[in-house]
Image (spheres, rainbow, N blue to C red):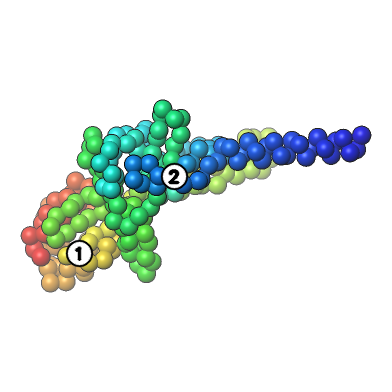
């Protein structure tokens, strides 16, 4: 009887492992000249969303002329491609210089190397302004807030939850490094020869450094000053 129980347990474990292996397929293959990875596995059940938008929207990849259904995973920093006819979702491999543009909005994401303080990071940034001499980007992020257990044993546990972090903003001047800025003073230091004019423009026009509309105005102004 003991041997029978052990055999049954082993069979269950093997079946579970096989089911899990079928649900997670990370084997690469080529479609339309690009390599994509299956991501059929589902994350553990948590509240919130990993995405800037749950919906897949028509978009184009700079290396591929076809239109695909795409969405941005801001938690893991990659794009997912939906293939509804196949019932599969796959990830777009990250490659420096590749951009993704949503057809309906024109919103563009570029995979670039950027700098925050002393850290060098490679990932997707949302293009806010693309003037000839100045580019301004937005970094969109989602983080996982771990859940907590009930202290008294009677109330429900607090589940883990995906939460949207505050956006970060970056600037590239004359094709140089893409660097982080968070204040008027920090931005002015990046253009020391025009720091006074930059501060005056921001103050006079009541520019909010966390509003994309205002940053577009700032990008246009900076481009005329350099």
Please report the residue visible at 56 percent of the width from the left and 37 percent of the height from the top: 23
Q: Is residue 86 visible?
A: yes
- Which one is nearer the viewer's eye here, 154 or 99? 99
Looking at the image, residue 11 sits to the left or right of residue 183; the answer is right
**Residue, x 37% and y 33% (percent of image)?**
55
Check disc 1: other Cα within 10 Å, few if <14, some if 14-19, many if 20+: few
Q: Picture quarter containing residue 49? A: top left
> Residue lying furthest bottom in this view?
193
Element type at mark 1: loop
Give the x, y percent position of residue 105.
Answer: 23, 37
Q: Which residue is mark 2?
A: 29
List x then y, in percent, for residue 127: 24, 50
Distance (Cα) linking label 2 and label 1: 35 Å
> On screen, 200 above or below 138?
below
Q: How many marks?
A: 2
Residue ID at (46%, 34%) = 88
Using the image as rendered, state which of residue 98 and residue 184 is in the foreground.
98
The quarter of the picture where residue 107 lies is: top left
Depth check: give the residue in front, 77 or 224.
77
Q: Which numbered dot is residue 175?
A: 1
Quadrant location, the N terminus: top right
In the picture, measured across the screen, residue 115 lies left or right of residue 128, that is right
From this viewpoint, which residue is outermost toward the right?
1
């Amino acid at each position: 009887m003991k041997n029978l129980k052990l055999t049954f347990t082993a069979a269950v474990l093997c079946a579970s492992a096989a089911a899990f292996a079928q649900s997670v397929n990370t084997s690469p293959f080529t479609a339309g000249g690009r390599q994509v990875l299956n991501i059929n596995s589902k994350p553990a059940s948590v509240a919130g969303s990993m995405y800037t938008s749950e919906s897949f929207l028509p978009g184009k990849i700079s290396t591929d002329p076809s239109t695909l259904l795409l969405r941005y995973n801001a938690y893991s920093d990659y794009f997912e491609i939906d293939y509804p006819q196949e019932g599969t979702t796959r990830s777009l491999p990250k490659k420096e210089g590749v951009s993704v543009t949503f057809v309906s909005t024109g919103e563009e994401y570029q995979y670039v190397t950027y700098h925050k303080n002393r850290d060098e990071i490679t990932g997707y940034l949302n293009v806010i302004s693309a003037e000839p001499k100045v580019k301004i980007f937005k970094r969109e992020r989602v983080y996982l807030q771990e859940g907590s257990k009930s202290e008294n044993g009677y109330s429900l546990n607090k589940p883990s939850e995906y939460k949207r972090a505050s956006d970060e903003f970056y600037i590239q001047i004359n094709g140089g490094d893409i660097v982080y800025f968070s204040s008027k003073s920090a931005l002015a230091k990046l253009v020391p020869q025009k720091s006074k004019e930059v501060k005056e423009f921001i103050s006079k026009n009541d520019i909010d450094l966390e509003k994309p509309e205002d940053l577009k105005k700032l990008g246009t102004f900076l481009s005329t000053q350099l």
